[in-house]
Image (tube, grey):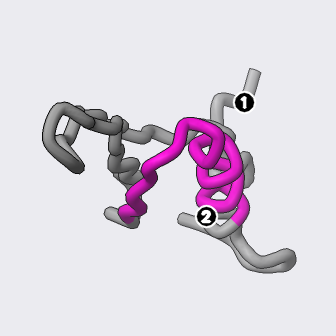
């Protein structure tokens, strides 16, 4: 069995997601977040949970290599 994987593209991505509660007015707060793709260092911030999944999908599509190019 050949264990060479140089031509196999990794389908795994590691993200960190940080969330915190921030006061926006007296006695009113909202949750905010930061997502970072560790392989590239790309960072995006979000203020609504509904934007998290579309943001992840965008970051994943941007991290995909161009067709016909190889990653080492």
- Most foreground residue, 66 or 53: 53
Instruction: Point out which mark residue 63 bears.
Output: 2
Q: Quarter holding the N terminus? A: top right
Q: Which residue: 65% across, 29% down? A: 3
Q: Is residue 46 magenta?
A: yes
**Residue 13 in view in this figure:** yes
* Residue 16 placement (x, y as % from top left): 34, 38
The residue beneath circle 1 is 2
Q: Is residue 6 magenta?
A: no
Q: Quarter holding the C terminus? A: bottom right
* Residue 51 placement (x, y as % from top left): 62, 48
* Residue 60 placement (x, y as % from top left): 65, 54
Q: Say whether residue 60 is left or right of residue 38.
A: right
In this rendering, the answer to whether 42 lies above or below 27 is: below
Q: Say whether residue 42 is left or right of residue 26.
A: right
Find residue 30 and report its image quarter. Answer: top left
Q: Which residue: 42% across, 41% down? A: 15
In this rendering, the answer to whether 41 lies above or below 7 is: below
Q: Say whether residue 29 is left or right of residue 53.
A: left
Callout 2: SS: helix
Find residue 26 and report its image quarter. Answer: top left
The mark closer to the camera, 1 or 2, is 2
**Residue 5 in view in this figure:** no
Instruction: Point out which mark residue 16 bears.
Output: none
Q: Which residue: 32% across, 63% down? A: 41
How many other residues sit within 10 Å of disc 2, few (<14), some (14-19) or many (≥20)? Answer: some
Q: CA distance from mark 1 to mark 2?
A: 27 Å
Asked whether disc 1 touches disc 2, contact meaning CB atoms under 8 Å apart, the reply is no
In this rendering, the answer to whether 70 lies above or below 33 is: below
Q: In the image as oriented, which residue stretches furthest toward the front?
A: 26
In this rendering, the answer to whether 45 lies above or below 28 is: below
Q: Which residues are magenta?
A: 43-61
């Amino acid at each position: 069995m050949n264990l060479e994987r140089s031509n196999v593209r990794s389908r795994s991505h590691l993200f960190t997601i940080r969330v915190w509660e921030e006061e926006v007015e007296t006695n009113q707060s909202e949750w905010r977040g930061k997502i970072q793709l560790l392989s590239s260092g790309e960072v995006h911030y979000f203020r609504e949970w509904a934007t998290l999944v579309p943001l992840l999908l965008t970051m994943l599509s941007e991290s995909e290599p161009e067709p016909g190019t190889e990653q080492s």
